[in-house]
Structure formats: C-alpha cells, structure tokens
Image (cartoon, rainbow, N blue to C red):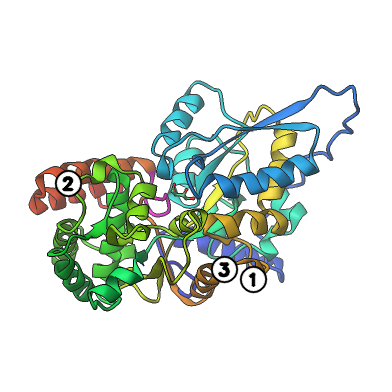
Amino acid sequence: MFPRKSVWGLASTLILVGLVFAACGTPATPRVEPLTNAPPAARTPSTPRQKIEVFSWWVGGGEAAGLEAMIKIFKAKYPDIDFINAAVAGGAGTNARAVLASRLQAGDPPDSWQGHAGQELIGTYVKAHQLESLNFLYEQEHWLNVMPKTLIPLISQDGQIYSVPVNIHRANVLWYNPRILAKYNLPVPATLDEFIADLDKLSSTSVIPLAMGEQWTAMHLFETILLSTLGPDRYSGLWTGKTDWSGPETRKALENFEMVLRYTNSDASTLSWQDAAQLVVNGDAAFNIMGDWNEAYFKELGKIPKVDYGWTPVPGTAGVFQFLSDSFVLPVGAPNREGTIDWLKLAGSKEGQDAFNPVKGSIPARNDADRSLYDEYSRSAMDDWASDIVVGSLYHGVVANDSWKTEINTDLGIFLTDKNIDTLQAALVSACKSSGPCQ
Ligand code: GAL
C-alpha cells in the first residue's frame, strides 16, 4: 500500500524526498533546481501568434467537459495563445498512447501530454529522458505546500519532479442500479462472497448481472479483484516482488476473477466503458466496476445520484483507495515551452483544478479544494482519500511500467478467450520475471 502511513515499492524515492523535506524545514521542500525559466517575454502585437498543442484522451462522454472547462480558463487568461486540443479518442488512452509513442519516436512531441503518476511516468517517459524537470515551477508556484506528500514521490526521480497532477481518480468503485437491487431484494454487497451471491441471483433474470466493456475494462476489473482477494499489503507486494505471483492467494484471486467474469455480458469486447456504464443507468445491468469517471458520465447523461445509480467500494475493498492521477508534463523540446509552462501553471492551480474536477468525477490533487463545488460522490471520495489506505492502479499507470503492463494485458487477452487459470498464472509469473521485480 502507499505510504500515507506506510511504505511501498517506491519507498526509496519517498525516503529520499522525505530526507530532503526534513533538511529544508517546514514547509517541506525537495531539493529544487535553480529557477531556470526566465519571466515571459512581453508579447507585443507584432509577436507572431503562439500555439500550444495539448495531448490527451479526453474526448468521450464525461471526459471532454473537464478538459474544456480548463481550456476555457486558459483561453481567457492567454488570449494570444492558440490552444490546440490534440485529444485522441479511446478510453484509458488505449489509442492515444500508441499515437503519442509514435510521435515521440519521430521526434514530434506535442507541447504537453496527459500521463499517469507512477510507473507510467517514471518508468516510461522519464526513463527515456523525454521530460524536463519541473522543480522550478513547483518552487515558483509553492506547489509542495498543497500537493499530497503521497503523490510527489510517484512523479519524482532523483529529487526532480516531472509532472503536474491535476486530479485523483479512484479505480475500485462498484456502481449499481438501486432500482434493480430493490426489485430483486438484493443487498449492496460488501464482500466478494456477497457480490457473487447477488450476481448469481441476477443471472436467472433478464438483467445483465455485471456490465463490462472492451479489454482494458476487463483489466480494470482484474486489478480490483486482485485487491479485493489479496488485501492492500499483498496487492501492493505484487508490484514490489514481495507477493508471490505463483502462490495460492494469487491463484485464489484468479479464480475469483474467472468467477466474476461468468456474469458479464457476452458482447463486452464491442463496448466502450461508457457503453458498459450506460447499461447500468438504463436498467439493463445491475453492476459495473469502473473508475469514478463513470460519475461524470452519469451526470452528463442527466442521471440522478442515489436514484439512477449508487456506488460503494468494490466488495472487499472498503477502507482502501486504489488511486490513479492524471498529470501533465513538459517535454524536452516542447515546441512552445513558454506557453506550455502557462498551461502547466493552470493545471496545477486551484482555479484550474476546481474547474476541471467537479465535471470530471475526480477530486483535485491539491488539498485546498473548494468542497462546496463538489457533489456528494466527490465529497465522499475526498473523505476516503484523506483517511483510507492508498494503493495504486495497474491499468492506469501507477504500479507497473509500460512493458510489464503490456505483458499482463496480453496474458489477460488470452485468458478472456481460453479461461485457463493455470496458463494465466504461469504467464503472470513470467511477466513479473521479465518486466517486473521478480528475478
Ligand atoms: C484513465 C484516466 C481517466 C479517464 C479514464 C477513462 O486512464 O486516468 O482520467 O480518462 O482513463 O478514459
């Protein structure tokens, strides 16, 4: 689990940053590079128009609105900069990340892009020396006073901070249709056994017990079942080499995953996450396990919380917050470095985060949000984020680098067809050896 109170795989980084915090007194500040960005040059009417291209995957229902809210502020603040929204469709960045990878390979980076805090950032872009350190901006904007101490180590390497987190999302949420549960007299499940009992009862009705979408949503489901079965310590140990991928507990998690999959819709591979979520609020399915971007989508559809949809932690994970964080970066060779820094300043500001998050379903990364702007779900997420044990998401970039995640994704793809638990477990053991910490 993450070190709100304890330690996880990036402990060494945390300790390093912690030591530097301690050395600098209060408020804690990591080693900061000298201020390197000069104040922006005056933009006279004769200055050619600038543009910045910002890359993300926030195109679909419930996603675009958050980004648009920030773009609106950016345009008002910087009327002389054209904002190019280079978002590429596809939930969880399935398409966007491939497009980004080929652009980076071709030496054609956008000015900034969306990257997940954790191993996606550190094990991919930082490792490939594609990003500039942002210590100067953290110092200038005093962000270390407002960004969570849990998060800084996950976006840092060797004392350098590499991104600006705009939010915190929760992965381990079970969304349900309250009318369906009431109709069939089913309790909101708190444990995996209760969940499976509900699913089983629903399987003899016309309702889809558990709505699922394309493959990445199966991997999302998978990581929550791993957490639910193993608990936070052993789940986090999977990513540090402490938990045995070949052990009986992991096997039990795979069996639970296989069991839960039996109750999903047969057309899952043709559905987006929005399609699957919509099955719940339209009354076609009882449950869906998905991140809290679902909430933004439901609201965009005009659905009413507690009436059209309810939420609870994925059964067996109460008290644990499986998190991910979207952040923006400054690439080496950003075509418009100065304009990109303006964008990052907005992304890290209270104003930017309080515009983005209430419509995105996430909570601000900053700890000084205006709570009154957030709805009941988001306020409950803020409370849980402040008090729960925190662990990282697999699909959304926190715990595994890209090559490990890709291997797991391939293994799961095979499993979705053959349902062979032995083969899956053996493949996961070997993925940890080839791309993870299991030597
Ligand atoms: C996640 C991302 C979220 C949301 C989700 C669905 O990876 O962090 O902000 O966009 O994918 O597309």
Task: Say whether disc 1 or disc 2 marks the residue closer to the N-terminus.
Answer: 1
Provide residue 412's location: percent of width, then percent of height: 21, 46
Q: Could you say where residue 171 lies in the image, as x and y percent from the top left?
A: 40, 60
Q: Is the C-beta separation of discs 3 and 1 under 8 Å?
A: no
Whichever of labels 3 and 2 marks the residue nearer the N terminus, that label is 3
Q: Which mark is residue 133?
A: none
Q: Which residues are magenta?
A: 396-401
Q: Which mark is residue 371?
A: 1
Q: Nearer the viewer, mark 3 or mark 2?
A: 3
Which of these two is toward me, 43 or 58? 58
Q: Which mark is residue 375?
A: 3
**Residue that appears at 24% across and 78% down:** 185
Q: Residue at x 33, y 51 (%)?
A: 276
- Label 3 sits on a secondary structure element that is loop
Check residue 416 in the rendering and tell me which mark sits there, or answer none.
2
Q: Picture quarter containing residue 256?
A: bottom left
